[in-house]
Image (spheres, rainbow, N blue to C red):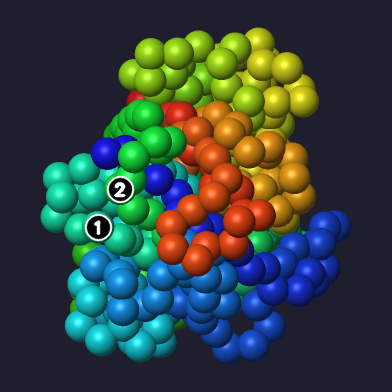
């Protein structure tokens, strides 16, 4: 049985001014596991399931609550999920695709039956808001989305592909704190140099992504044995403005079938794709039965894509009006060759 999306919801904190733009920003002292609590309850209600029905809690994030234990452990405790297995997924911008791949493998193998998969980020506490840092700070936002996944007959994930290439990792990274630096992971000199903030080689990263994001979408479509003409919506994600438009043009996609996942709220890294998917469902932009392709590119050369088809109805007492999209193909691709 294919992996199906049984419930999906998201949460964004209120907008705050960041440089020249508005971005969802967590003002209270919260971590990504806190942002994911409300959408988790909503997604479980849509699926007609309770916390006790879960076999695994997955959490995709690059901004965990603390260094360890993982965000999934914090989240599992806050859910009051007892001793349910919990696992972090570290795929950066492609974290949602990476997590889908992990969940699909577990469900397809019959190891688990119901998985709660959260993706959440709190970037705002780790950005440089000075005049020099604002062009990068403006890219990011905070937020979370939660999906309930399970194996069932009918619509479900048709393909997931994922790649990474870390050879040029320093083109897009946060270098410090670093466990490879002794005796301290970060020093006063490091802090003064600002190496605890994100750094990006815009020209290189944009060019690489504009080439490889379309490639990973094509690969996902091929694995699903279909073409772009048979996909109702492409939800694409990249940190830099303009890259999604370039990728869509390279794929010759009609504008009305492309959703730039970060256009509305900025780059939420692992949460970008599921938040955009959840909003498209809630707004009615995705009709029941729509076939969706998700794709992302990010740090470490991580990139991936996948797709699914959705349908109405659901398991148990799930809300009848809720539409569950079906990823036809999911693709994640990352830098940099």
* Quarter-of-image position of residue 182: bottom left
> Label 1 neighbourhood size at 10 Å, few (<14), some (14-19), many (20+)?
some
Between residue 57 and residue 110, name the one nearer to us: 110
Q: Which residue lies furthest to the right in this view?
A: 20
> What residue lies at 52% left-to-right and 63% top-to-bottom?
318
Q: In 3D space, how far apart are the residues under numbered discs 2 and 1 (Cα atoms)?
A: 6 Å
Q: Is residue 269 left or right of residue 190?
A: right
| Element class at badge 2 | strand
Label 2 CA crowd tier, 10 Å (few <14, some 14–19, many 20+) = many
Residue denoted by label 2: 151
Answer whether labels 2 and 1 touch (C-beta < 8 Å). Answer: yes
* Rendered residue at 40%/87% (across/down): 78
Which callout, 2 or 1, points at the residue further toward the start of the chain? 1
**x%, y% of residue 252?**
65, 11
Q: If the image is split into quadrants, where does the N terminus sit?
A: top left
| Residue depicted at x 15% and y 50% | 110
Residue bearing the label numbered 1: 113
Q: In front: 178, or 332?
A: 332
- Say whether residue 170 is visible: no
Residue 81 image point, x, y percent: 31, 83
**Element at badge 1?**
loop
Does residue 85 sit above or below 112 in this rendering?
below
| 23 versus 291 height, above or below | below
* Residue 153: % across, % down: 34, 40
Q: Is residue 88 left or right of residue 334?
A: left
């Amino acid at each position: 049985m294919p992996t199906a999306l049984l419930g999906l919801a998201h949460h964004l904190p209120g907008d705050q001014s960041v440089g020249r733009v508005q971005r969802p920003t967590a003002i209270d002292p919260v971590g990504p596991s806190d942002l994911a609590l409300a959408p988790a309850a909503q997604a479980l209600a849509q699926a007609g399931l309770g916390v006790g029905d879960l076999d695994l809690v997955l959490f995709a994030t690059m901004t965990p609550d603390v260094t360890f234990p993982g965000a999934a452990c914090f989240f599992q405790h806050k859910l009051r999920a007892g001793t349910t297995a919990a696992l972090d997924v570290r795929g950066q911008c492609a974290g949602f695709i990476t997590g889908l791949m992990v969940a699909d493998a577990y469900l397809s193998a019959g190891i688990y039956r119901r998985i709660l998969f959260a993706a959440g980020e709190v970037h705002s506490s780790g950005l440089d808001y000075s005049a020099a840092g604002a062009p990068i700070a403006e890219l990011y936002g905070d937020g979370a989305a939660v999906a309930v996944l399970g194996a069932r007959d009918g619509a479900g994930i048709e393909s997931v592909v994922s790649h990474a290439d870390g050879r040029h990792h320093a083109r897009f990274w946060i270098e410090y704190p670093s466990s490879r630096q002794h005796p301290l992971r970060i020093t006063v000199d490091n802090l003064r140099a600002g190496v605890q903030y994100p750094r990006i080689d815009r020209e290189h990263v944009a060019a690489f992504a504009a080439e490889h994001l379309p490639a990973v979408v094509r690969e996902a479509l091929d694995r699903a044995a279909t073409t772009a003409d048979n996909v109702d919506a492409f939800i694409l994600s990249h940190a830099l403005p303009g890259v999604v438009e370039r990728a869509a043009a390279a794929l010759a996609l009609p504008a009305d079938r492309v959703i730039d996942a970060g256009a509305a709220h900025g780059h939420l890294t692992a949460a970008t794709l599921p938040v955009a998917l959840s909003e498209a469902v809630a707004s009615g932009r995705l009709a029941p039965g729509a076939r969706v392709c998700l794709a992302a590119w990010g740090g470490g050369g991580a990139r991936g894509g996948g797709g699914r088809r959705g349908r109405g109805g659901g398991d148990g007492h799930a809300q009848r009006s809720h539409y569950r999209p079906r990823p036809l193909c999911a693709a994640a691709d990352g830098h940099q060759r």
